[in-house]
Amino acid sequence: MTIDLGTYSAFLFDFDGSLWTGDAFYDGALEFLDQLSEHGRDIVIVSNTSTATGAELEALLAEGGVDAGLSALTVVDIVGTALVEEVGRCAVRVCGTDALRRACEAAGHTVVPLHDRRRADALLVGLDPTFSYRDLEVAARRIADGERFFVTNDDGFHPGPAGAPVPETGAIASAIRRVVNVKPRVIGKPDARIFSAALTLVGARAAAAIMIGDNLTTDIDGAAALGITTAWISHGTALPHPIAHRPDFVSPTIRGLLDIVDAAPIGPIESPIAARAPSSRAAGS
Amino acid sequence: MTIDLGTYSAFLFDFDGSLWTGDAFYDGALEFLDQLSEHGRDIVIVSNTSTATGAELEALLAEGGVDAGLSALTVVDIVGTALVEEVGRCAVRVCGTDALRRACEAAGHTVVPLHDRRRADALLVGLDPTFSYRDLEVAARRIADGERFFVTNDDGFHPGPAGAPVPETGAIASAIRRVVNVKPRVIGKPDARIFSAALTLVGARAAAAIMIGDNLTTDIDGAAALGITTAWISHGTALPHPIAHRPDFVSPTIRGLLDIVDAAPIGPIESPIAARAPSSRAAGS
């Protein structure tokens, strides 16, 4: 079974744990991107990181010499419009980095600092490396008092240097939820919005896109719900039984997936590749 | 249905959320304690707090004018011996207050600071008001590296002033668990050890004891597992269906439980009340 380049115009990739180990690219990752680029395929990194925008991630990759003409889209790029959809332009208490606060302000929301006494409509939690017990206490009380609870993502960790787990937004959210017993609404993967935004960014239909990632919930279930083809990097883990959505392709490594990309019989791409509209990222959809 | 004083020699009480609202005693709580004291019943507060010993809690109550001749036992009093039972005398990395560290040292363990590079056998998490994201990261990595994961209790919160939820050990544990997917071993209620220690403290058999608390898991299931009679303060919450253990008595308030204590037909107490042995608290069993 091969990944036929004739079928897919858009290749969506998860970043942490799929392309990036935490301190280096996985073996084969850069070759994979280069090969797609050579064949004119669109590449979008679709990341649940809440500490950087897609443009910031692109800049970091360019600094590191990665130049495959790729785009990157993170939950920061879509969080502002997602909140507009859910609660309208609102007062949002933000627990997270400056990137998250700026994204909310750019979408027209009023950002309320976590410890501010003003009432807010929503409380948004992203990864916050300065998070403390006192922040936990305040966040829980604000939600108990009726502020709506949003999280950028529900990932428990992402891989850091030497593969050590770096606590993610989902761990912080889990602590808050354990205090107030309120389930947060998740903005990032597996929610459909970030995948839809990625398809729009490169003008691809779901049927002409493939999502490659290591997380069966966020990457595989999330993309499959939109009808996007899925490829799972298992890192040697067996598929669970039962499984919500069986991925279309499975490989223990990204090198293994690269090896089954069939570039030979390239036919016409089913979906025309639309011209990139850089401003569409900011719009988020 | 009445709580017959002739049946019970020992009255075990949960503290936070049962006797204490967070900044005051519940209506009827002190009268309840006084009535039991007048009738010579033993009273033991059995608390999952990990920030104070039973003796410290007793001293605080005495300072506040509560003088019902009661005893208090917290998870701090039993954690040292519990760890000996589980792993022997060991090197234990402690995330929590000084009370917890002292308790571990008193039981012969070597206490390793959370951020110390030395390897430990176990990592023990209690309530830590200085807990930070950096602590979360270190704790998760140590558990990922094989240190055994213990928590003093798995309560998500306890009530604070004006009833606002104060994040408890279970919330911190939940964040760690979300990063490493390791379930911690719980030392406090509903584990049997603290109930056994409370019975030993006053020389009562389980059949002659009643546990009064507001938490169906920690207080009611925990005590029932030892054959202790249980009384649930519901605060107006309905009993769930199905339920692990149906409490023997239910009241929305502690005042309501006091009102059904039948002091009139006091017969002989089934179990002789043993003399208090203050040193038995430190031994923990």
Image (tube, coloured by chain):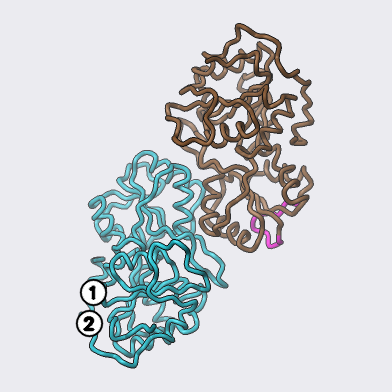
Chain colours: A cyan, B brown
Question: What is the quadrant of the C terminus of chain B in the image?
Answer: top right
A260 or B257, which lies in front?
A: A260
Element under disc 1? loop
What residue occupies the far top of the structure in this picture? B264
Q: Quadrant of residue A146?
A: top left
User: Does B118 appear in magenta?
Assistant: yes
Q: Is residue B241 above or below residue B33?
A: below
Q: Position of residue B78 (x, y in %)?
A: 70, 39
User: Does B185 appear in magenta?
Assistant: no
B78 or B164, which lies in front?
A: B78
> Residues in magenta?
B110-119
Cα distance between the residues tagged 2 and 1: 9 Å
Kindly indicate whether the residue at mark 1 contacts the one at mark 2 (C-beta within 8 angstroms): yes
What residue occupies the far front of the structure in this picture? A242
The local crowd at label 1, few if under 14, some if 14 to 19, many if 20 or more residues have their Cα within 10 Å, is many
Q: On the image, numbered disc 2 is attached to which residue?
A: A270
Q: On the image, numbered disc 1 is attached to which residue?
A: A205
Asked whether the viewer can see residue A51, the reply is no
Instruction: Tell how many labels.
Output: 2
Indicate the amino acid at tag 2: Glu
Q: Position of residue B211 (x, y in %)?
A: 60, 26
Q: Quadrant of residue A266?
A: bottom left
Q: Position of residue A47 (x, y in %)?
A: 38, 68
Q: Position of residue B21 (x, y in %)?
A: 50, 28
